[in-house]
Every structure is written in structure tokens, then in C-alpha cells.
Image: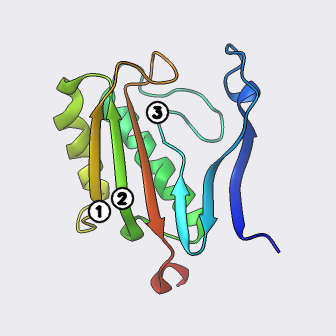
Amino acid sequence: MPTHTRIRTFNTKDTYPEQNLDNDLCQAVVANGVVYLRGQIGQDLETRESVGIGDPVAQTEQAMANIKLLLEEAGSRLEDIVKVTVYITDPRYREDVYRTMGKWLRGVYPVSTGLVVQALARPEWLVEIDATAVISQGAES
């Protein structure tokens, strides 16, 4: 019996055809009541199309919508997030990104780490957010 549930598996050769990659990954892993999410960016999970090019607020909205969807698929919810890590490519995006993320996480109070990085996996991505959550009793109702 597997101890982990892997949600939305994929291979990087399909996700990043312009790059010479061949890694088996997934969008979320549930292990022992904890949900670990892959970093989410301004990309539609269904079409893999980048959204909000040049707009950190639109990319943050998409990343948070993805996080919400993935948590629900894993049996969790936004209220169960315990940790977020935010990566931005320009420190000037911080206020817009955190204000946007904050609307989604009002009253949640996760721990948070924020980093300014030189670049993300694709040049059009300006923000990436990963999250860790638990599966609480209330998530199933």
C-alpha cells in the first residue's frame, strides 16, 4: 500500500519542451496528512499556458488559484496552509504580490519565507509560490 498520493503527475519533457529535461514530477504529494505543493506560477494547470505575462498581480492570482485547486484535489484547503515560500524576480513586486496573496490567505496566518531570485524556470514568470498544508478534519466536510 503506497504511503504517498501523487496528484497531477507529469514529465518535464512535456512541460518544458524547449529544455532538454526528462524528470517525473507531480503538482502535489500527500504524505502522512501533509500536502506538499510544487511551486505555482502564472500558468494555467489545464492548458499549461502562461497567464499575466508582465503582470505580477495576475501571476499571483493564478498561482493562488492553482494552490486552492490543488489543495482541494488533495483533500485540504487554503485555511490549512502552514507554510508558504514566495519567490519574486524583482523586489519592486513584493508589495503587489504579498497584497494579492494576502487576500487569499486572510485569517490563515501561515509562516512565510520570501526570496528575490534572479530568474524562474521561464523568463516570463515573475513570481512563484509554494505551499505546505495539512489535511484537517474540517477539510473533508
Question: Mark 3 sits on what residue?
Answer: 42
Q: Residue at x 45, y 65 (%)?
A: 133
- Contact between labelled residues 1 and 2, with CB atoms less than 8 Å apart: yes
In the picture shown, does residue 81 fall above or below 117?
below
Q: Residue at x 45, y 18 (%)?
A: 124
Mark toward the start of the polypeptide (2 vs 1): 2
**Distance Cα–Cα, label 2 vs label 1:** 5 Å
> Could you classify mark 2 by the number of other residues whose Cα lies within 10 Å: few (under 14), some (14-19), or many (20 or more)?
some
Percent across and percent down for residue 25 are: 69, 42
Mark toward the start of the polypeptide (3 vs 2): 3
Percent across and percent down for residue 129 are: 40, 43
The number of discs equals 3
Question: Mark 2 sits on what residue?
Answer: 83
Identify the amino acid type marked 1. Answer: Pro
Q: Residue at x 35, y 18 (%)?
A: 118
Percent across and percent down for residue 81 are: 39, 64
Indicate the secondary structure of the residue bearing disc 2.
strand
Question: Mark 1 sits on what residue?
Answer: 110
Identify the amino acid type marked 3. Answer: Gly
**Distance Cα–Cα, label 1 vs label 3:** 21 Å
In the picture shown, does residue 11 fall above or below 7?
above
